[in-house]
Image: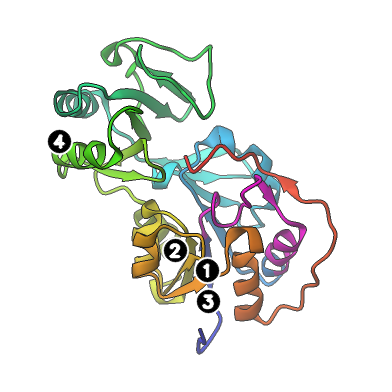
Amino acid sequence: MSRARPPRLVATDLDGTLVRSDGTVSGYTRAVLAALDERDVPVLFVTARPLRWMEELWPIVGGHGTAIVSNGAIWFDVPSRSVRHLWGIDAEVGVALTDAIAAAVPEATFALETESGIRYDPRFVDEWDPRPGSPRGPLRSIWTDPVVKLLVTAPRVDPERLRTATLDAVGDRAVVTWTGPHLLEISAAGITKAATLARVAAELGVTAADVVAFGDMPNDIPMITWAGTGYAMANADATLLEVADATAPGNDDDGVARVLADLFGLDVARSGEEPLQAIDRGHR
């Protein structure tokens, strides 16, 4: 789609969007990101990934040195490897939420994503990134730090029932989203990818109208609809495709890079450069 002028800020999800299905970032995509960095156009990674899944990607984050992780709960400074701001759920609110969810879905199990790592309730089975040394126990005893994402899973429960029951149990006390059928991610009230992206954009002096965003799953909807131009990947969830302004080629076809090259008039050749392994554990 045509624009009167190129965007001033790019915001992109990672898994299913910038990252290919095999967990790599292609040489072409990296070259496009580097070309934009040379033009001083910030490309913000805005992801559900926890900090521990980002280390391989920091080298391509760009000179602006900023990323948004854990669905907007952490605004991260890459050069100093430090959290600029964290919006978490404290124990008083969080334990009440888990009690309400467990009453509605007795099969539900929980894990707590914190700045320092993950913690599990006794029944939680981590199918994505098991951490055997992580604290495990009753939530009241392990909820000692603000939680950036409360994870809820119930593998034997119908996904629609799990979502509906959890949304009803949580209400407006927190934000519930998902990137797959059997795992829900809950953030503090008012915290989404869009909310934190708006804060970063404001610091950079950029309005929503000058932001282009890319995503593929329901947790990207707030960001895609907030940005002046929101692209859904061709492989995106139907709910995102319905609200996006445009569709980009799929993540396995370097869709983000191809759209950006067109928007900014970049002449970047597709090379045989070795792809960057970014680790793919699904959409979490």
Q: Quadrant of residue 151?
A: top left
Which one is in front in this view, the residue at disc 2 or the one at disc 4?
4
Q: Which residues are magenta?
A: 12-35
Q: Which residue is mark 4?
A: 169
Q: Which residue is mark 3?
A: 7
Q: Say whether marks 1 and 2 touch (CB < 8 Å).
A: yes
Q: Say whether marks 3 and 2 touch (CB < 8 Å).
A: no
Q: CA distance from mark 2 to mark 4?
A: 33 Å
Q: Residue at x 41, y 57 (%)?
A: 237
Q: Say whether marks 1 and 3 touch (CB < 8 Å).
A: yes
Q: Secondary structure at mark 4?
A: helix
Mark 2 belongs to which amino acid? Answer: Ala
Give whichever of 111, 163 is nearer the camera.
Answer: 163
Query: Can residue 48 be found in the magenta stretch?
Result: no
Q: CA distance from mark 1 to mark 3?
A: 6 Å
Earlier residue among tags 4 and 3? 3
Mark 1 belongs to which amino acid? Answer: Leu
Mark 4 belongs to which amino acid? Answer: Ala
Earlier residue among tags 3 and 2? 3
Q: CA distance from mark 1 to mark 4?
A: 37 Å
